[in-house]
Structures are given as C-alpha cells and as structure tokens.
C-alpha cells in the first residue's frame, strides 16, 4: 500500500530532493535509484481531470513523458518513489513496495 504524499521531500546523503527539482538535481543529491520506469502519460486539460480528446491529443500533445525512480531507504524505512513529469519532480510517494 502506498500513501499519497503532497509536497513531500526526500532526505538524501547529498541534500533534500523536493517537488520542482530536476532529474539531474535528484541524481546529484540522492545518487542512482534502485529501480527506474518511464512511460508516456495521457495529457489532461489544465486544472481538470478531462483528457484532451482525439485527434487533438495525437496531433498536438499526444502524451507527456513520466519517469519514476524508486529509492530503497534502508531497513525500517519505506521505499520512496520520485515521479518526474517533463523532467521535473511532480511528486514523492512512500510505500512498502513500488506501485
């Protein structure tokens, strides 16, 4: 079970990673992740949960690149999943296993 976390941060040896940080910044602060995933997420209208319909989505903005990095924070700590959208940290979630 993963708990949603808003405006969370991730304490690392090289500093604190937070929303708005770049992939490069997180890699510098936290090192290489245990796991990585990358996929193309659907695009929604701004400030809504409504998908941009076809054919507009395919022609103009078919999807947005999302990267997820998982960090194992050691015994007794929950794993951290750092989600990047367009190369910037969108969220940091904690859970026993990656989602």
Image (cartoon, rainbow, N blue to C red):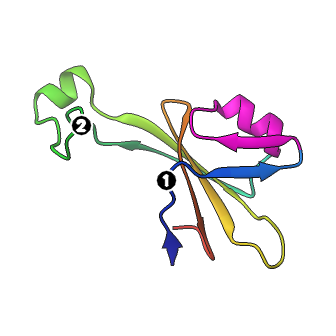
Q: Which residue occupies the foreground of this view, 64 or 75?
A: 75
- Name which residue lies at 63% across and 77% down: 96
Circle 2: element type:
loop
**Residue 16 lies in the magenta stretch:** yes
Q: Is residue 77 above or below residue 38?
A: below
Q: Is residue 55 above or below residue 78?
A: above
Rendered image: mark on residue 83:
none
- How busy is the neighbourhood of tag 2: few (under 14 within 10 Å), some, or many (20 plus)? few
Q: Residue furthest top?
A: 60
Residue 99 placement (x, y as % from top left): 51, 67
Q: Which residue occupies the foreground of this view, 8 or 36?
A: 8
Q: Which residue is mark 1?
A: 6
- Name which residue lies at 20% across and 29% down: 58
Residue 65 placement (x, y as % from top left): 45, 35
Image-quadrant location for residue 84:
top right
Circle 1: element type:
loop
Residue 13 placement (x, y as % from top left): 89, 48
Horizontal relation, residue 9 to residue 28: left or right? left
Q: Residue furthest right?
A: 13
- Name which residue lies at 32% across and 34% down: 63
Horizontal relation, residue 35 to residue 20: left or right? right
- Name which residue lies at 66% across and 33% down: 23
Horizontal relation, residue 88 to residue 35: left or right? left
- How busy is the neighbourhood of tag 1: few (under 14 within 10 Å), some, or many (20 plus)? few
- Magenta segment boundaries in residue numbering: 14-31
- Counting residues from the start of the chain, the first of labels 1 and 2 encountered is 1
**Residue 81 lies in the magenta stretch:** no
Number of marks = 2
Q: Which residue is mark 2?
A: 47
């Amino acid at each position: 079970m993963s708990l949603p976390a808003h405006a969370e941060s991730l304490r690392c040896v090289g500093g604190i990673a937070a929303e708005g940080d770049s992939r490069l910044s997180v890699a510098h602060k936290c090192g290489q992740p245990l796991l990585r995933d990358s996929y193309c997420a659907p695009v929604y209208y701004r400030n809504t949960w409504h998908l941009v319909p076809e054919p507009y989505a395919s022609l103009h903005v078919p999807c947005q690149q999302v990267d997820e990095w998982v960090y194992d924070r050691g015994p007794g700590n929950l794993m951290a999943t750092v989600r990047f959208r367009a190369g910037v940290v969108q969220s940091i979630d904690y859970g026993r296993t990656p989602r």
